[in-house]
């Protein structure tokens, strides 16, 4: 029996719940002044979005992100197994080879499809772990989505790109994948697979956390991605959860003091990540990149969850 949708989203949040917190950042007032200065500059250069909830973009929103912001999207994980072990990963350990919808384990693909149909989603991200560890399973999921959900459904495949080859890319395109989401932070910012993916997919997007100490390499990368014709660079605020807090502590990260304790969701932003993204956004505007740079903050994630729960309540009334 499919569990109530409210439990789906609540368990997603609880799965990321912190058992403890990072130490709070120091000189928070100075950080907030710098961020306010960045925001003024961003507004003067035409930034778009909703600054009050940390949702900003330079050009346009991606096709997969639009329904997500409206609470009309979900994530189908085909496994949490992965060939990499990123310090920022929020998947619980030990990794398990299970199917899940929005963080809730399901017993079968049929149950997953039923959950997504009940949610009425317009966009689905297929991810993991690394989904392409099990390509056959990925193609079964794509076929089921295309058969049972709206013909207009947008499907993104999330991958670290280690398993991308030209034949796999062509198969994914033919099967009905709308676009790719590649996490280059997971592979040391090596963008070679992006060039390969652009031979097949028009919608190749980079989605990764904004790591403060990687600012320079990301700025250099932005030029290359823009030249390749990448449509979107989606930057997430780095956050602490039960799964990654130990690795974040080892690297000396601190918690942001931006009032995240008031969020509905249970993860918390890491200090300096948002300020780093503001700098990347301004850099993109000043260099007039055709590629859109989009900031998805912890506040944005909170907004998405709230909208999803509202939609669920409306559908149940």
Image (cartoon, rainbow, N blue to C red):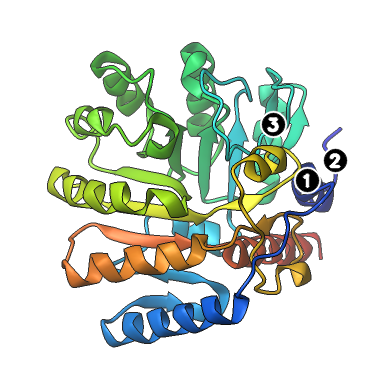
Front: mark 3 or 2: 3
Say left or right for 164 vs 111: left
The image quarter containing residue 278 is: bottom left
Instruction: State how far apart marks 3 and 1 are (Cα).
Output: 10 Å
Query: Which structural element holds mark 2?
Result: loop
Say left or right for 59 vs 97: left
Q: Earlier in the sequence, mark 3 or mark 1?
A: 1
Q: Which residue is mark 1?
A: 8
Please tell me how crowded label 3 is: few (under 14), some (14-19), or many (20+) other residues with Cα within 10 Å.
many
Verify CB contact (< 8 Å) between mark 3 and mark 1. Answer: no
Query: Compared to 241, does 279 lie above or below?
Result: below
The N terminus lies in which quarter of the figure? top right
Number of labels in the image equals: 3
User: What x and y, as percent, mark residue 288?
Assistant: 16, 67
The image quarter containing residue 69 is: bottom right
User: What x and y, as percent, mark residue 174?
Assistant: 31, 24
The image quarter containing residue 196 is: top left
Q: What label does residue 299 carry, if any?
A: none
Residue at 43%, 51% (x, y): give it: 213
User: What x and y, as percent, mark residue 12?
Assistant: 75, 45
Front: mark 2 or 1: 1
Residue at 19%, 32% (x, y): give it: 195
Query: Which structural element holds mark 3?
Result: strand
Query: Which structural element holds mark 1?
Result: helix
Verify CB contact (< 8 Å) between mark 2 and mark 1. Answer: yes
Residue at 25%, 46% (x, y): give it: 221
Q: Residue 142 or 222: which is nearer the viewer?
A: 222
Q: Which residue is mark 2?
A: 3
Work out which residue is located at the far left of the displayed protein and give it.
227
Q: Residue 145 or 107: which is nearer the viewer?
A: 107
Instruction: State how far apart marks 2 and 1 are (Cα).
Output: 7 Å
Q: Which residue is mark 3?
A: 100
């Amino acid at each position: 029996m499919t569990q109530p949708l409210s439990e789906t989203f609540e368990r997603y949040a609880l799965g990321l719940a912190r058992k403890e917190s990072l130490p709070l950042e120091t000189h928070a007032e100075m950080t907030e002044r710098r961020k306010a200065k960045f925001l003024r500059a961003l507004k003067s250069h035409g930034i778009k979005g909703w600054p009050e909830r940390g949702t900003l973009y330079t050009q346009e929103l991606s096709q997969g992100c639009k329904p997500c912001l409206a609470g009309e999207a979900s994530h189908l994980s085909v496994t949490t197994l992965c060939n990499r072990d990123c310090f920022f990963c929020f998947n619980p350990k030990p990794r398990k080879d299970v199917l899940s919808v929005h963080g809730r384990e399901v017993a079968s693909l049929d149950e997953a499809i039923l959950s997504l149909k009940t949610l009425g989603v317009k966009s689905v991200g297929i991810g993991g772990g690394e989904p392409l560890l099990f390509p056959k399973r990925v193609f079964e999921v794509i076929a089921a989505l295309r058969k049972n959900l709206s013909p207009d459904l947008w499907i993104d495949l999330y991958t670290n790109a280690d398993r991308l080859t030209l034949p796999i890319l062509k198969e994914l395109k033919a099967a009905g994948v709308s676009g790719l989401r590649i996490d280059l932070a997971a592979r040391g910012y090596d963008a070679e697979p992006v060039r390969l993916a652009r031979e097949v997919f028009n919608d190749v997007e980079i989605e990764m956390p904004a790591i403060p100490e990687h600012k320079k390499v990301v700025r250099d990368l932005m030029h290359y991605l823009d030249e390749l014709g990448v449509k979107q660079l989606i930057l997430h605020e780095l956050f602490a959860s039960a799964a990654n807090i130990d690795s974040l502590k080892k690297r000396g990260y601190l918690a942001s003091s931006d009032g995240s304790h008031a969020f509905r969701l249970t993860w918390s932003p890491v200090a300096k990540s948002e300020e780093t993204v503001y700098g990347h956004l301004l850099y993109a505007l000043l260099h007039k990149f055709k590629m859109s740079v989009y900031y998805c903050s912890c506040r944005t994630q909170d907004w998405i969850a709230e909208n999803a729960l509202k939609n669920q309540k409306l559908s149940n009334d």
